[in-house]
Amino acid sequence: MEPITSTANPSWRLCVAPMMACTDRHCRVLHRIAAPRARLYTEMIPAAAVRHGDWQRLLRFSSAEHPLAVQFGGNDPADLAHAAGLAERLGFDEVNLNVGCPSPKVREGAFGACLMRTPERVSEATRATQEACSLPVTVKCRIGVDEHDDYGFLRDFVGRVAGAGVSTFIVHARIAVLKGLSPAQNREIPPLKFHRVQRLARDFPDLRIVVNGGISEVGQALECLAWADGVMVGRAAYNRPEWLAALHARLTGGTALGAAAIVDAYVPYVESALADGARLHDLTRHMMGLGSGRPGARRFRRALSTFARRPDARVGDLLEAFEQVAPNLTLRAA
């Protein structure tokens, strides 16, 4: 199996999905520790907000996060081009266009999954984005939307957008149901149809096809990588950082970091972020899954929830909480 390359030549073999209210800059540092060579993605950022709002806050990240892609949502080519230019200037490694989000708020803004119905609009937007920057411009989409639940619709959408110069597609192997299902239900209820994405990879051998959706076991990821150019993992990586580390180790031939090693490496960042004005809760809420399945994991989560919201909470409280999971381990950070 082709290994993941170094961060100097980042690949798409292992990607961590953009997840709203999850993959903020603190979360991405934690994921970078667990998976040093994975490609990380920001939460979806509205391109209009970048153009008209506090873009420095919206696009903030640390150098430790590379390789890092920024995901924009929007349908206005000018807004997306402006945002892409800033992304390149700030040092992102990729610009990704969200054409898969099913949330009602996104739909009201006429972007996300509903854009799959208008491939000409997506083509126009990606063409403008590519003209505004030299970064790879990629598209994340679903296999269909609402009544458009057939392979021909997906094939035609990808073919049209590829004609505008996009060579990498990240495909969530479920359709998006925009009426009647919530965003959370859209991650669970529409059936996974990996065979449709596999057919897409076969029909477009010159494109890079990364598969996403419901990948929660190492063996499942390896099966997908037998035909896909990469896998994108989401909730499993967020809820089980040690699983992300195990998958990364399997794909790189390295050694997986355990919970203690991940905490050990994260604590210096926590200290630095607190000194920079961050709240401890914003840093620790992404750690709830550490130690999952071990005795004491529930007590660890309860302890995190209890102390992290206190205004006087400090790193020492975090280390004491972790002792609920690993009472006999000594952390260097301690």
Image (tube, rainbow, N blue to C red):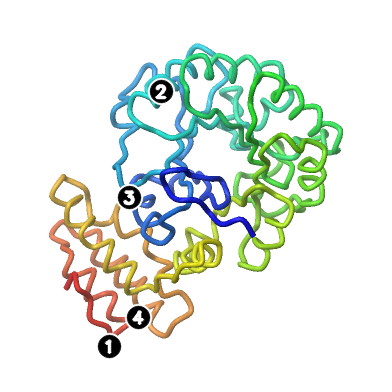
Q: Nearer the viewer, mark 1 or mark 2?
A: 1
Discs 3, 4 touching: Cβ within 8 Å: no
Q: Nearer the viewer, mark 3 or mark 2?
A: 3
Residue 283, quarter of picture: bottom left
Q: Earlier in the sequence, mark 4 or mark 2?
A: 2
Q: Amino acid at mark 1?
A: Asn
Disc 3 to disc 4, how far (Cα)? 22 Å
Q: Amino acid at mark 2?
A: Ala
Q: Tag 2, which secondary structure?
A: helix
Discs 1, 3 touching: Cβ within 8 Å: no
Q: Amino acid at mark 4?
A: Val
Q: Point out residue 288 in the picture as x, y percentages from the top left corner.
A: 39, 65
Is 115 displayed left or right of 159 in the figure? left
Q: Which residue is mark 1?
A: 328
Q: Which residue is mark 2?
A: 49
Task: Please name whichever residue, 135 or 323, is drawn nearer the observer in this view of the structure.
Answer: 135
Q: Residues within 10 Å of mark 2 (few under 14, many from 20)?
A: some
Disc 1 to disc 3, how far (Cα)? 27 Å
Disc 3 to disc 2, how far (Cα)? 21 Å
Q: Earlier in the sequence, mark 3 or mark 4?
A: 3
Dot label at residue 26: 3
Q: Point out residue 120 in the picture as x, y percentages from the top left corner.
A: 71, 16
Dot label at residue 185: none
Task: Please name whichever residue, 177 or 199, is drawn nearer the observer in this view of the structure.
Answer: 199
Q: Amino acid at mark 3?
A: His
Is 332 displayed left or right of 284 in the figure? left
Q: Tag 1, which secondary structure?
A: loop
Disc 4 to disc 2, how far (Cα)? 41 Å
Q: Which residue is mark 4?
A: 325
